[in-house]
Image: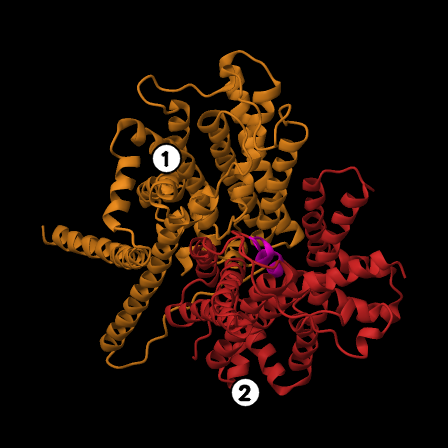
Chain colours: A red, B orange
Amino acid sequence: MDPVLVSTLADIVRNAAPLLIASQGELITERAGVVNLSLDGTILLAAMAAFAVTYNTDSLGLGIVIAMLIGMLVALIVIASSVFLKLNQIAVGFVLTLLCADLSTFFGRDYAGQQGTEIPYAPIPILEDIPVIGEVFFQHNILIYFSFVLVIFIWLWTYHTRFGLSLRGLGEHPAAAYVRGTRVQMWRFVYVAAGGALVGLAGATYSLSVKLGWREGSTLGNGWIALAIVIFGGWRPFRIAFGAYFIVGLRALALYFQQEDVLNLPIQIINMTPWVLMLVTLIFVTSGLAESLLVIVPPRWRPAAQNLLRAKPPAALGSNFERS
Amino acid sequence: MTAFRKLFVQTSSRTALGIFPLLVGTLVALGAIFLILNNENVEPRAVYDLIYERTLSLPDNRANVVDFWLPILLCCCGLLLTFTAGLWNIGIEGQITMGAVGATSIALFVELPRNEQIFTELFMAGAAGGAWALFTGIMRTRGGVNEIFGGVAMNFLASNFSAYLLVAPWSPPNATGSATVRFPDNALLPSMDTYRLSPITIYIALSAFIFVLLTLSGSRWGLQLRAMGKNEKSAQMLGIPTERNIWLAMLMCGIMAGLAGGHLVLFRRANLPANVSGGIGFLSLLVVLLASIRVRWVPFVSFAFALLYSAGLPLRTRLQLDSSLIGVFLGILVFCVLIFDGARQRLQAIVEQRKLLADAGGEKSPPPPTIEIQIGQEASGGPSSS
């Protein structure tokens, strides 16, 4: 296989990792019935904090833990204000995203452009030698491997465990989950905290691995993309993973076209393509247009295709739960 | 007389209750900023003096604050309509950018007599901003794309499109793509003789505010928007044309944001710079959130925000503080107000519930209504529902 293509695919896998981790974090948050809109600011603040802590202490582990704690704290503020004060989750999330972005700029100004420590390269023995697959998937660092494992873990947890069943119950019908003995508020706190920690980890993945270092607004926009990917992915782990790779793949393609002078288009126009494609795909999937085209699919495969294209949000998403 | 007194007491206690979160929020935000400044070894007094000096000390500085305030007020007026209808128009940044692009397209390439020129530029600004917002509304109602994500995508598209225009077709010779050439004087909004303020923008902003105030407080359409903001599905079942109203609210908001963008390029800058909106759309969202969509508060809150933001740049140059400190202060302020307002409402609900229980002689009354926010088709939103 063309070595340039293999290396491009490996880059896509590496660059998509933070987006993948953040969107899986938002997935479990939304599956629990909570919208955390603060992703964009949280990722920025966590990326800055991870870099600053690592820079000052030389401890990558501490940097990652602090980033995860920041993500967790922000997410807990969203859920706590919703549960205890009945505040609008979108309003709180939006204010927090702006506040976190400004905090990252203010506290990160001394670290902008500094050289920092990188998560060490850790190819997986034996697997790294598999032709093509080895280079694309198994010659990275531990955070990138974690992103693959996370998708499988969340899929298993959501669809193949009792806990997953209760998680889906929290988002679809919290009253029914409560009647079945699930402690709705407690589990919502747990899942939102876990989702927030993953968003924080995504920030750390940016500053310690993918976009090494810190500069003002370095990850700006990626939180919004992660949120859009969750919708694009129909709240399902593997489709979300596909969405993350798809978006990053488009960016890589744009860069490749520019470098190879294949398309004589300015970078600004190329940068627009992922957003245009995302909107077109979202319209295609969420408007029901895709389902109406299912008539061309043989009847035997129609239910499977219908299931594949399903993009319905959890029924109780964004709602407060009150014991009656 | 007794009835009047009772009404007065009730009204004052309601106002006091409404202002309480704002006061506590301001105190907490100031406390946080004092801590940050202490950590940076900067005297809070020096920051205050600088802000005063750069904003209120001289007539020209005051005019500059008002000039910065007008586009924010315009955006807030638009957002009041969308918020009331339960729409989160996060795409307002893109609508400002497209308004600026629309105005620039006329300012750079069309030559008309002065009045017609300015009318056409402002018309294009409003039309471009309105179209950008309307598209987000159509995507929501017909395409099922939530306005938050549609708006974010449209923001990125507008910003990239404007950047493309600056590096390619509208780039001045030997330029770096940071701005277009200065517009001819004929294309610029006229200024007052005494202060550098645009009377046209003042008229537009004040008219927009009066229009929104009247619409939301005393019109049938305003009532329909309120009903949609409370519960879109119920409003639809009651025969309110929700789709048409979403389009109309988005269109009006986009027009106002577009006009704000037009003002930025036709008066404040006299050219189209990169990142023309400069975050005033998000700032306006914060204003509307802080004012809890109370229309009468918006001019005052937006003016206070404009005043603080105008002082952002000197902080960096004079005190080596990043201008994001102002953003941090405003973020903490809005956040605290939301939290304390939520706490106040919660306490009020509990007190009312207990009173009901006591009145009913211990008979259990129904719990206070809970607010449900749905993402997707049923997205509802503003602080009215919090």
Residues behind callouts 1 and 2 on a single chain: no
Q: Amino acid at mark 2?
A: Arg
Q: Nearer the viewer, residue B360 or B312?
A: B312
The crowd level at tag 1 (other Cα within 10 Å; few <14, some 14-19, many 20+) is some
The range drawn in magenta is A218-227
**Which residue position is annotated with label 1?**
B210
Please identify the quarter of the rendering in which residue A222 is found: bottom right
| Most frequent secondary structure within the magenta stretch | helix
Compared across the picture, whether B383 is left or right of A306 comes to left
Element under label 1? Answer: helix
Q: Position of residue B169 (x, y in %)?
A: 68, 28
When the figure is inspected, residue B29 is found, relative to residue A321, above or below; the finding is: above
When the figure is inspected, residue B175 is found, relative to residue A317, above or below; the finding is: above
Element under label 2? Answer: loop
Q: Nearer the viewer, residue A51 or B246?
A: A51
The crowd level at tag 2 (other Cα within 10 Å; few <14, some 14-19, many 20+) is few
Q: Is residue B184 in sight in this rendering?
A: yes
Q: Position of residue A175 (x, y in %)?
A: 51, 79
Residue ID at (41%, 40%): B215
Q: Amino acid at mark 1?
A: Ile
Marks 1 and 2 in Cβ contact (< 8 Å): no
Q: Residue furthest left?
A: B1
Mark 1 vs mark 2, CA separation in Å = 53 Å
Q: Position of residue B322 (x, y in %)?
A: 40, 48
Q: Is residue A33 in sight in this rendering?
A: no
Residue ID at (42%, 59%): B385
Compared across the picture, whether A31 is left or right of B354 comes to right
**Which residue position is annotated with label 2?**
A180
When the figure is inspected, residue A177 is found, relative to residue B305, above or below; the finding is: below
Which chain's residue wears label 2?
A: A
> Does the magenta portion include B364?
no
> Does the magenta portion include A226?
yes
